[in-house]
Amino acid sequence: MGKPIPLSGNYAVAYAVKAADVDVIAAYPITPQTAVVEKLSEFVANGELDAEFIHVESEHSALSAVVGASAAGARVFTATSAQGLLLMYEIMHIASTMRLPIVMTIATRAISAPINIWCDHSDFMASSDAGWIMLMGVNAQEAHDLTIAAYRIAEDPRALLPVAVGYDGFWVSHTVEPVHVVEREGALRYAPKRVARYVLDPERPVTMGSLGSPDWYFEFRVQLQDAVEKSREVISEALREFKQHFGREYREVDGLYTDDADVVLVLMGSAVGSAVPFAEEARRAGLKVGVVNVRLFRPFPEEEVLKHLEGAKVVAVVDRAINPGSSSVGPLYSDVAVTAFKRGLDVPILSYVTGLGGRAVMKSHFEAMVKHAYGFVGKRMRDVKTHYSFVGVRE
């Protein structure tokens, strides 16, 4: 496995991209992801990475550039956050429907206004309907490993879909941790470069991104839905193979202490690192608390989530984003609640929104959630009058 080296989450991603031996990088700086592409430009400049680095005038152009490069058969990368991701939103749909295996990392950040450069999941969640496979890392090691896994997933001919890897801005992007770095040889054994079947080539002209009239557009969108659904097998296989190659195990969903839990906390990202020791402490105090880490957000892993909820008396979903005006309030809550409804799980499912705009998710917040959730033990969902709460917000 080798000796770990101290890296920030951003640098961990840059080392992963170098190991994947990408051909084209296009990027525009935005906090808190800028250090990713700064490090990659250093790798290119000093000859450590043989890639074309395209300096563009906006994030819209960055994703457009890698769309073109991917269509020509290159292995590509870009990175962004917040308003930059929103500027890419138009092109995200083009990338997925054209079935281009682009890898992009998102250092999650709150969306303006007011201007805020710190972490929440508003940007990540805002792009969740674009037809991309979406993964979320807990720490720098996961950001590194999932970026490499993203190439194995995206370029699999059974998938051929873009993949976004999220990790929390500042909490992960700027925090230095020991990271076991995958070397180029190992990365390419695990995720060899694709042999593209259809590419933009003047010698063999093809049409990409043509007009979709009412006669055909509907079918194209259904094909994308089918492709994302069918990618589940590829994702599972890629994560299993990652353990075989590198010894570190990742699942679409991790569950801890869920077998006998009264209250199960369901969440994503760096707050999982705080929820786990809280659950351990709560159990020592006699409270049966479990934790579910949703690592794969799209396609949503219904079966994997459900198996950790079946014995719960209350499900507490923790979101770092809000859908204003939605009946679900929290985006993760929406998927969890629909999953439970479809499978006939009739227990209270509660939504807790916390940690917006970079505010820390603290032990006291989890204590408040669990105390509130325990008040619904023994009840059904129809007994819940107000299903959501804002935790850690000033009155």
Image (spheres, helix red, strand yellow):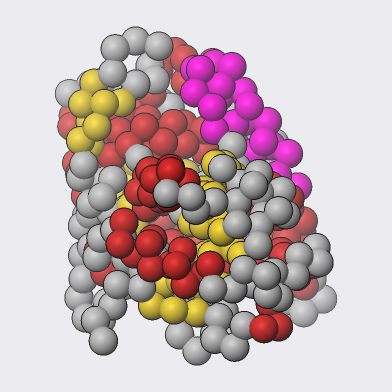
Q: Residue at x 26, y 69 (%)?
A: 357
Q: Position of residue 88 (x, y in %)?
A: 41, 64
Q: Position of residue 124 (x, y in %)?
A: 43, 62
Q: Is residue 165 visible?
A: no
Q: Residue at x 80, y 63 (%)?
A: 343
Q: Is residue 290 visible?
A: yes
What residue span does the magenta drawing correspond to? 230-250
> Viewed as shown, does residue 186 lie left or right of 167?
right
For the stretch drawn in magenta, the main secondary structure is helix
Q: Position of residue 141 (x, y in %)?
A: 36, 32
Query: For the C terminus, which image quadrant?
Result: bottom left
Q: Residue at x 28, y 45 (%)?
A: 172
Q: Position of residue 135 (x, y in %)?
A: 51, 48
Q: Compare residues 385 and 374 and report the one nearer the observer.
A: 374
Q: Compare residues 134 and 53 and report the one nearer the observer.
A: 134
Q: Is residue 231 magenta?
A: yes
Q: Residue at x 28, y 78 (%)?
A: 393
